[in-house]
Image (cartoon, grey):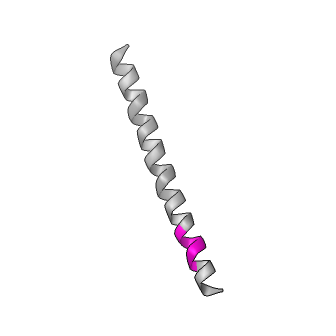
């Protein structure tokens, strides 16, 4: 039971960091597009 809870917390943390990384990449790509045009 406790291990399942720990796994869920780990997945939530991984998902959170993945979202942050994805947003950073999106922001970088947008900045690059603005510089190119």
Left or right: where 23 falls relative to 12? left
- Residue 3 higher or lower than 13, as above or below: below
Judged from this view, the residue extending furthest toward the right is: 1
Q: Residue 9 in magenta?
A: yes
Left or right: where 2 falls relative to 25? right
Residue positioned 39% across, 20% down in the render: 34
**Helix, strand or loop for the magenta stretch, by majority:** helix
Q: Nearer the viewer, residue 24 or 1?
A: 1
- Residue 4 higher or lower than 28, as above or below: below
Q: How many marks?
A: 0
Left or right: where 35 falls relative to 22? left
Q: Residue 26 in magenta?
A: no
- Residue 14 higher or lower than 6, as above or below: above
Q: Residue 25 lies in what quarter of the image? A: top left
Q: Residue 9 lies in what quarter of the image? A: bottom right
Residue positioned 42% across, 43% down in the render: 24
User: Residue 12 at what x, y percent from top left?
Assistant: 56, 65
User: Residue 16 at what x, y percent from top left?
Assistant: 52, 58
Judged from this view, the residue extending furthest toward the bottom is: 2
User: Residue 1 at what x, y percent from top left?
Assistant: 66, 86
User: Residue 7 at what x, y percent from top left?
Assistant: 57, 74
* Region rendered in magenta: 6-10
Judged from this view, the residue extending furthest toward the left is: 35
């Amino acid at each position: 039971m406790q291990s399942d809870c720990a796994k869920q917390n780990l997945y939530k943390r991984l998902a959170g960091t993945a979202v942050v990384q994805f947003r950073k990449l999106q922001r970088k790509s947008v900045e690059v597009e603005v510089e190119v045009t």
